[in-house]
Amino acid sequence: MRHPEILVCDQTIREGMQYRGVVFTYDERLTILKFQESLGVDISQVAYPPAHETERNILHRLIRYAEEQKYKICIAGLGRSLTYDADLMIDAGATEIQIHTVMADRFENPWNMDIFFDTLKKVVHHTRSKIRNARISVSILDIGRTDPGMLEKCVQFLSQDLNVEIITLPDTSGIMAPNLLYDRISDIVAMTKKNNARIGVHCHNDMGMATANTVLGAVAGASLIEVSALGIGERNGIGDLFLVGKTLKEQGYGINLKTDNLEQFKAYYSYIDMLIRQKTGIGILTYNTPFFGESMQTHVAGTHGARSFGLDQGDNWLLNVLCGKHLVKKFLEKNRIPYPVQLLPEIVDEIKNRSASLGRSLSKEDISEIIKKIV
């Protein structure tokens, strides 16, 4: 089955600055942008111009830098659904115009929706009057708390009446389960098939579902994903750039992201971890980080010693009461501990007994002592 092309918007910079109050300097953002370009990211959201003049200046400088270097990556800022905010991005040289608007719980009276639509219409028409080649993205907050009927009306207005290129449906509150998000995105994609609008997903990790939700959003038909390095972002973050990209790419989705360049991805993630560690005192690339964490190299259960399970076939084997013959054999060979092959079952039994009595895994010295005792 041929899957549609999916654009990747890396929000490590803008969303990342909502993680524990972190602030990225121009030089730090430039380094992040270089990583993103080298890894095939399509769009980088680098600033929030309405917040401060430094944000506007950084957006302008990074756009100019990308143009001078002939980067393929598109540079975007984010603003509110106001002509003022759109002008800030336009004046900075942006053609990738991303705006957000809050829809949840605001339409108790019908006239409120008319005002809401009129505001969106003004900012979209204003932007197009100034930039003919603008690609406009509108994020509607929030898919988890907005009435489905109201959400569909808004999407229909944006896609059919305003011909907006990208409509992103964030689960900003982080309350959606993968199956629920899949159903909601599927419905929206079905009603926008006749239009050229891309549907985007942006999922928060309050329930630990952000990466899974982002993947399911794409499977449901979304053709833009908003993610970040190590899932960094507001509260507990958003979907992880590498994990989402790799999962979808291995299922045949068309993604420019270079997920096979593990060395560069590790360098990118290590750089983000270093910045976070410097600015907050606590790193984000931990022992248990999926794929890149050291835990990927650790095996304990016997079946894991018999076959190549896991993404990293590491050699950190820990022997405890759960070990089996294959794992013990690998451990002994790795540590160059000689043993009579015919006594391997007896050695395994003694390791299990010793581990159970001590309530811990055994050290190399413990294993050597057991073999000496048995032999």
Image: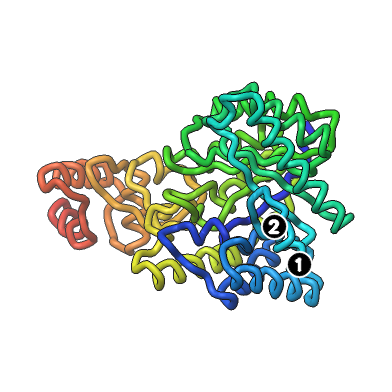
Residue 49: image quadrant is: bottom right
> Disc 2 designates what residue?
84
Kind of residue at disc 1: Asp
315 up-or-down from 81: above or below? below
208 up-or-down from 67: above or below? above
10 Å neighbourhood of mark 1: few (<14), some, or many (≥20)? some
The percent position of residue 74, horizontal first and vertical second, equals: 75, 61
Mark nearer the viewer, 1 or 2: 2
The percent position of residue 44, horizontal first and vertical second, equals: 67, 60
Residue 119: image quadrant is: top right
Is the Cβ of the residue at disc 1 closer than 8 Å to that at disc 2? Answer: no
Rendered residue at 63%/31% (across/down): 112
Which of the numbered marks, if any, corresponds to residue 91? 1
Q: Residue furthest right?
A: 132
The percent position of residue 21, horizontal first and vertical second, equals: 43, 62
Q: Residue furthest top?
A: 149
Rendered residue at 59%/46% (across/down): 244
Quarter of the rendering occupied by the N terminus: top right
* Frontmost residue, 131 versus 277: 131
